[in-house]
């Protein structure tokens, strides 16, 4: 259950300019020496990180170059993901790049590999526990055709490296992260603003477990404390299952903007998850989804809030 907040540690965070990692890096940098790693294609995000006290170190997971990172880091939290949609690049970077990273940090106290509930085989409204069937859920999206398979491949790498290097590891299968920095609900809000129809699966409703960025940050110490050899695998999502239809409906309520849905079989299916293991290892989430969405709108589009 809930571990003490981290302070005075050296923590490497990969994918630091990304939606999920940036708020974690910024928050951890208040009490720790945080090294943010990425290629830094996004200068604005890099500047925000540096302003928050994060030391930015370029790496490239596709080539396996992680040599600039401190080998004596206490903890590593790996959020980087490569979605070029090219099989060779994405397999090399997400699986091979992770192997280089875990080898480099084999003396760390603990390692978190951020995976995804995209590793589960589409099975309608089945509630997935960690031992359930894996499959290519995101292959249905041509623009993310490599995603699920590369996330599964990366899990296999993390499992191997945990045993090979006796590096305590947690593989956390993240559902739908969101918050002030964005996320799927924020994309839906932009679609609503543009009058675009929102794809939902024909096997309605399309249910996930939105997890607010504050809970993501808050759970990092416990996910590190849960790291083991062989690796701990745990679902990672908000306590409440919420459908796209419900969260877009609430965004409509907040803003008065209509949400139009387009039911289709050519989009990802529901992924409801069993959170028993997360609750036992890490605890429960604290940000109710309606509060989190209201905060997201207030930050990203304050002019849209009706009250
Ligand atoms: N967002 C979601 O809805 C969602 C849902 C479930 C799970 N997840 C998982 O959560 C994690 C974070 O996702 P995210 O949405 O925050 O990702 P993101 O916004 O796409 O960010 C990806 C990060 O990886 C870095 N990166 C890309 N190519 C790289 C390379 N070759 N070498 C080193 N770094 C590279 C990017 O920076 P540069 O381009 O500058 O290198 C960026 O910092 C991922 O593991 C993802 O699979 C996300």
Image (cartoon, grey):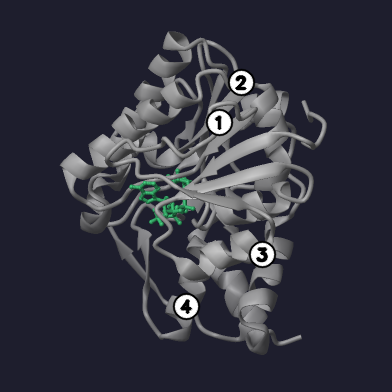
Nearest to the observer: residue 124 or residue 59: 59
What percent of the width, then of the height, locates residue 83?
A: 30, 51
Give the residue at mark 2: 227
Q: Nearer the viewer, mark 4 or mark 3?
A: 3
Q: Residue at x 25, y 36 (%)?
A: 92
Point out the frontmost of discs 1 and 3: 3
In space, the residues marked 2 and 4 are separated at their CA atoms by 37 Å
What residue is pinned by disc 3?
51
Residue 132 visible here: no
Residue 27 against residue 61 in the figure, above or below: below
- The reply to whether discs 1 and 2 touch (Cβ–Cβ < 8 Å) is yes
Q: In the picture, residue 255 is in which quadrant?
A: bottom right
Question: Residue drawn at (37%, 76%), measured in percent from left and top?
Answer: 197
* Element type where label 3 sits in the image: helix
First in residue order: circle 1 vs circle 2: 1
Could you tell me residue 14's position as x and y percent?
50, 43
Q: Residues within 10 Å of mark 1 (few under 14, many from 20)?
A: many
Residue 296 location, quadrant: bottom right
Q: Which quadrant would residue 212 be assigned to in this image? A: bottom right
Is label 3 or label 2 in front?
Answer: 3
Q: What residue is pinned by disc 4?
A: 190
Count residues near mark 2 (Cα–Cα under 10 Å), then give few for <14, some for 14-19, many for 20+.
Answer: many
Q: Is residue 229 above or below residue 117?
A: above
Disc on the earlier residue, 4 or 3: 3
**Position of residue 108 measured from the top left corner of the image (x, y, whole percent):** 59, 22
Q: Is residue 235 left or right of residue 92?
A: right
Which residue carries the number 1 mark? 112
- Of the numbered discs 1 and 3, the one sitting upstream in the chain is 3
């Amino acid at each position: 259950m809930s571990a003490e907040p981290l302070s005075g540690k050296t923590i490497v965070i990969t994918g630091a300019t990304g939606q999920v990692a940036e708020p974690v890096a910024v928050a951890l940098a208040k009490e720790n020496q945080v090294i943010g790693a990425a290629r830094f294609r996004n200068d604005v995000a890099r500047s925000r990180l540096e302003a928050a006290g994060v030391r930015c170190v370029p790496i490239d997971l596709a080539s396996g170059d992680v040599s600039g990172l401190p080998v004596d880091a206490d903890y590593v939290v790996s959020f980087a993901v490569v979605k070029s949609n090219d099989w060779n690049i994405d397999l090399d970077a997400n699986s091979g790049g992770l192997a280089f990273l875990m080898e480099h940090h084999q003396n760390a106290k603990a390692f978190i590999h951020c995976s995804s509930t995209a590793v589960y085989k589409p099975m309608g409204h089945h509630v997935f526990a960690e031992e359930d069937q894996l499959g290519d859920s995101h292959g249905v999206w041509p623009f993310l055709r490599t995603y699920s398979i590369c996330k599964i491949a990366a899990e296999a790498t993390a499992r191997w490296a945990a045993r090979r290097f006796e590096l305590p590891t947690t593989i956390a299968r993240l559902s739908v992260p969101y918050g002030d920095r964005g996320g799927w609900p924020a994309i839906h809000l932009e679609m609503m603003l543009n009058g675009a129809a929102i794809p939902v699966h024909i096997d309605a409703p399309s249910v996930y477990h939105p997890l607010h960025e504050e809970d993501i940050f808050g759970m990092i110490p416990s996910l590190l404390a849960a790291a083991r050899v062989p690796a701990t695998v745990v679902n990672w999502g908000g306590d409440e299952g919420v459908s796209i239809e419900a969260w877009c409906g609430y965004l409509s309520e907040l803003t008065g903007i209509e949400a139009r849905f387009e039911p289709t079989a050519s989009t990802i299916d529901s992924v409801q998850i069993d959170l028993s293991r997360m609750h036992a290892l890490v605890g429960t989430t604290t940000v109710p989804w309606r509060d989190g969405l209201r905060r997201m709108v207030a930050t990203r589009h304050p002019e849209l809030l009706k009250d």
